[in-house]
Image (cartoon, helix red, strand yellow):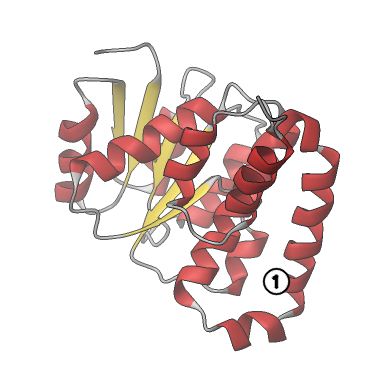
């Protein structure tokens, strides 16, 4: 079913950009860009979701992302990249981090659908989910010992705990199935939210 959301796909590998566009074109209004410069020419207030490669020869995905946030464009951004997540991602303002290759069309559609849902949440909940995405990306690639030794990661955990406390009443009203699908049941801040929300539900 086609909806009105606009998705901008950015990757300097033309074949990947075009493939991802074909996977999504039946459901979304698609724009494509084959460089960071083209991405900044294409993006405006009409764009709802950006799928952004991180490593490009002219402008990097990080530079594009910084410009998107500086313009205060209200869109959700997923980094879709072959760059393994490291602790430097904690400084980036993305909403989700997806490692290439993405070989399953349904995986990409699920990412876009999740970001579309996030747009309906307020800014604090969006922040919570973005931080949870960073935590999940690092947990999927880093040894627990390395995580425990990193001060920025420890600060991330502290910030998530504070946000969970602030938003506990709100999170009980979130779609539990959407959160579980987003984070694949991993032991992340989001899955803790799922469990705590269910634990707090009154017995019937």
Q: Residue at x 29, y 42 (%)?
A: 108
Q: Residue at x 73, y 63 (%)?
A: 156
Question: Could you say which quadrant of the image residue 118 lies in?
Answer: top right
The secondary structure type at the circle numbered 1 is: helix
In the image shown, does 78 or 64 lie closer to the viewer?
78
Q: Position of residue 29 (x, y in %)?
A: 30, 18
- Which residue bears the numbered disc 1? 153
Q: Position of residue 163 (x, y in %)?
A: 80, 46
In the image shown, does 61 or 83 lie closer to the viewer?
83
Question: Could you say which quadrant of the image residue 5 lies in?
Answer: top left
Q: Residue at x 15, y 42 (%)?
A: 19
In the image shown, does 58 or 88 lie closer to the viewer?
88
Q: Position of residue 117 (x, y in %)?
A: 50, 26
Relative to 198, residue 79 above or below? below
Query: Does residue 33 appear to the left or right of 21 in the view shown?
Result: right
**Label 1: few (<14), some or many (≥20) within 10 Å?**
some
Query: Does residue 161 appear to the left or right of 125 in the view shown?
Result: right
In the image shown, does 43 or 118 lie closer to the viewer?
118
Relative to 202, residue 78 above or below? below
Quadrant location of the N terminus in the rendered image: top left
Q: Residue at x 42, y 52 (%)?
A: 184
Q: Position of residue 15 (x, y in %)?
A: 14, 49
Can the viewer see residue 93? no
């Amino acid at each position: 079913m086609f909806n009105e959301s606009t998705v901008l796909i950015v990757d300097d590998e033309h074949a990947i950009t075009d493939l991802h566009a074909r996977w999504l074109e039946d459901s979304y209004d698609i724009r494509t860009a084959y460089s960071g410069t083209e991405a900044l020419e294409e993006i405006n207030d009409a764009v709802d979701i950006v799928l952004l490669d991180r490593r490009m020869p002219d402008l990097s995905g990080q530079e594009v992302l910084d410009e998107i946030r500086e313009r205060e464009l209200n869109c959700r951004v997923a980094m879709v990249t072959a760059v393994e997540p490291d602790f430097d991602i904690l400084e980036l303002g993305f909403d989700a981090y997806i490692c290439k290759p993405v070989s399953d069309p349904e995986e990409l559609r699920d990412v876009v659908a999740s970001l579309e849902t996030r747009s309906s949440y307020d800014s604090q909940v969006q922040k919570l989910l973005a931080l949870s995405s960073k935590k999940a990306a690092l947990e999927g690639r880093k040894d627990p010992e390395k995580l425990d030794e990193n001060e920025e990661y420890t600060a991330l955990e502290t910030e998530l705990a504070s946000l969970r406390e602030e938003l506990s009443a709100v999170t009980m009203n979130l779609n539990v199935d959407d959160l579980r699908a987003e984070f694949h049941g991993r032991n992340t801040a989001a899955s803790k939210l799922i469990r705590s929300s269910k634990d707090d539900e009154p017995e019937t």
